[in-house]
Amino acid sequence: MIHETPLAVGQKSILKDVDQIFKSWTDGTKHLISHYLSPIEFRQRASFTGTDHELIEWVKNYPSQYGAIYVVSDHNLSYDMDAIRPTLSFYQLVVRDADTIIQKQNNNGTGQASSGCESL
């Protein structure tokens, strides 16, 4: 199941915000997985960090039938992940006040993100 509304965390309070999110009730265990270019605070807290492809592979191999997966990636991978594992709950995390490394790399020098780029 995909939870449509991205969960926004503040750049200056990432760890506190993630801890608060993790306090909420879910079926099964909770895991944070992040793209390797995500802010360092996510990568340090993540159960797994890798490329988009590696994140999808991690979900394919997730051992439990139920659980909550919090995804940090510049691309909205939740739809692909939900198609693979529909019994898991997916949440897209976004950083509401950050220019991430991924966004800077996709920036084309214009100050605006290139098409297809979703903000973290």
Image (cartoon, rainbow, N blue to C red):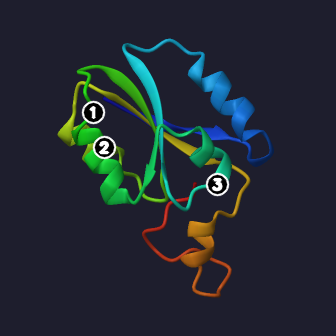
Q: Residues within 10 Å of mark 1 (few under 14, many from 20)?
A: some
The reply to whether discs 2 and 3 touch (Cβ–Cβ < 8 Å) is: no
Locate residue 33, reporting x and y percent. 46, 42
The amino acid marked with disc number 3 is Pro
Q: Is residue 1 above or below residue 103?
A: above
Question: Looking at the rendered structure, which numbered label has been put on residue 84?
Answer: none
Q: Residues within 10 Å of mark 2 (few under 14, many from 20)?
A: some
Quadrant of res 99:
bottom right
Q: Residue at x 48, y 67 (%)?
A: 117
The amino acid marked with disc number 1 is Tyr
The amino acid marked with disc number 2 is Trp
Quick one: which residue is furthest to the right in this view? 12
Q: Is residue 114 above or below residue 41?
A: below
Q: Residue at x 54, y 42 (%)?
A: 93
Q: Secondary structure at mark 3?
A: loop
The reply to whether discs 2 and 1 touch (Cβ–Cβ < 8 Å) is: yes
Q: Is residue 64 left or right of residue 16?
A: left
Q: Earlier in the sequence, mark 2 or mark 3?
A: 3
Q: Disc 2 to disc 1, how far (Cα)?
A: 6 Å
Mark 3 = which residue?
39
Q: Residue at x 45, y 24 (%)?
A: 30
Locate residue 52, reporting x and y percent. 37, 58
Question: Looking at the rendered structure, which numbered label has been put on residue 62?
Answer: 1
Quadrant of res 78:
top left
Q: Residue at x 23, y 21 (%)?
A: 65
Question: Looking at the rendered structure, which numbered label has been put on residue 58?
Answer: 2
Quadrant of res 87:
top left
Q: Is 60 in front, or is 6?
A: 60
Q: Secondary structure at mark 2?
A: helix
Locate residue 76, reporting x and y percent. 40, 52
Q: Residues within 10 Å of mark 3 (few under 14, many from 20)?
A: many
Q: Is residue 2 left or right of residue 100?
A: left
